[in-house]
Image (cartoon, helix red, strand yellow):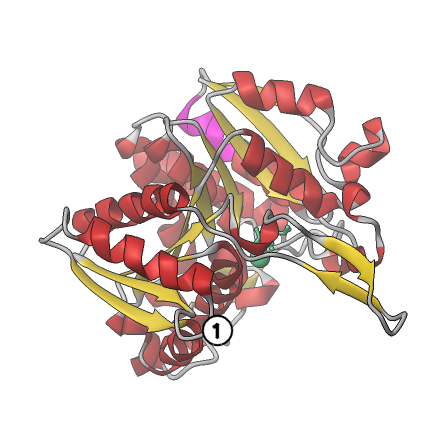
Amino acid sequence: MKIAVMPGDGIGPEVVAQAVKVLRVVAPHAETEEAAIGEAGIQAHGVPLPQPTLELARKADAILFGSVGVADEADIPRERRPGTGLLQLREALTLYANFRPAYMFPELIGASTLRPEVVDGLDIVIVRELNGDVYFGQPRGFETNEAGERVGFNTMRYSESEVERVARAAFEAARRRRGKLCSVDKANVLEASQLWREVVTRVGRDYKDVELSHLFVDAASMMLMRRPKQFDVIVTGNIFGDILSDAAAMLTGSIGMLPSASLGYNRKGLYEPVHGSAPDIAGKDIANPLAAILSLAMMLRESFEMEAAASRVEKSVRAVLAAGYRTADIQQEGTQCIGTRDMGDAVVEALRKQAA
Ligand code: IPM
Ligand code: MG
């Protein structure tokens, strides 16, 4: 087990450190090696995805990722933007299917901003395409129009094969769950989405046991707030998936709870919390490490086929929540607020108890 550890920026290093603590207990034989990415990559080597980091990613079996980003990132030129490091890594390793589960821990129902009956029992997965769309489409850039005004432009593009591979990943996931897949697009306006819908429908003929539906992204975002439990698996493009997965995460009370897996053609995956680098709370020992710890559980399951270890980690997280421990983002009346490190220790403790 060779695991590349990429803590990144902001709260990334703090939360990843907790996940590594948990790893040492569930897989003591795992080898880890750290590499810099994002702003940390720029500080160390001048670019957001340094060469040694990419090499490590190529030879590792899996990547445990924290988060990248600094405040006011939009003002920085693209090639020096921390987030660019993550995008380049997803592209270089062809990690095209991003699984973002939004699962309601019963202990946290009160932490959601939605009414309990709306989110009680929520268990959905967003499968976000990760290698195409306006994120990577060419042409892109800035130009000057006839009026002498600056214009910024991007291109939304999807090829049939790009849609097909992520659609298959999503149908497979739906098959292992409740057998429902909703494809989200904007086919009433965009050609890229029209093609998306055609291809998903065609692939669906190979998955007759999965109930396929389609929604436009605006309606889907409304339905996510109104009746989120109607969904099982959602498959969507890169930009819609970016937006919808943050919204879905918040249904569960805190984006600090949500893990993700980015997968490609083999078992190698990149595992990261859905949350960002949160520079405003970095270094304060208040960030929630549970998304990072749950990302580790996804890694054990998907990259190493260690189902038993994965569910032990998830059970330990449940146990810690049931015991009333909370980080600030999920604090409720009658619970005990603890810091990042203590939360990591609490999960480790719960793991040890399970083993005993
Ligand atoms: C995410 C993030 C990234 C994205 C950023 C950091 C480039 O928002 O993983 O959702 O837009 O994909
Ligand atoms: Mg995002």
The quarter of the displayed image where residue 306 is located: top left
Numbered-mark total: 1
Q: Is residue 260 left or right of residue 166?
A: right
- Give the extent of the magenta segment: 20-27
Q: Is residue 356 left or right of residue 45?
A: left
Q: Residue 127 at what x, y percent from top left?
A: 38, 52
The single residue placed furthest to the left in the displayed view is 209
Q: Where, quadrant-wise, is the N terminus in this rendering?
A: top left
- Cβ of disc 1 within 8 Å of ligand 2? no
The single residue placed furthest to the front in the displayed view is 146
Q: Nearer the viewer, residue 134 or 150?
A: 150
Q: Which residue is mark 1?
A: 334
Q: Nearer the viewer, residue 150 or 349?
A: 150
Q: Where, quadrant-wise, is the C terminus in this rendering?
A: top left
Query: What residue lies at 38% left-to-right and 31% top-to-bottom?
Result: 300
The answer to whether residue 71 shows anywhere in this view is no
SS class, disc 1: loop
The single residue placed furthest to the right in the displayed view is 148
The quarter of the displayed image where residue 344 is located: top right
Q: Residue 192 at what x, y percent from top left?
A: 45, 59
Q: Residue 31 at what x, y percent from top left?
A: 52, 16
Query: What residue lies at 32% left-to-right and 80% top-to-bottom?
Result: 118
Q: Residue 103 at what x, y percent from top left?
A: 35, 60
Assess whether residue 253 is covered by the magenta stretch: no
Identify which amino acid the numbered label 1 is placed on: Gly
Indicate whether 43 appears above or below 177: above
Indicate whether 347 appears above or below 25: below
Query: What residue lies at 52% left-to-right and 66% top-to-bottom?
Result: 330
Please identify the dominant SS of the magenta region.
helix
The answer to whether residue 143 shows anywhere in this view is yes
Q: Nearer the viewer, residue 136 or 78?
A: 136
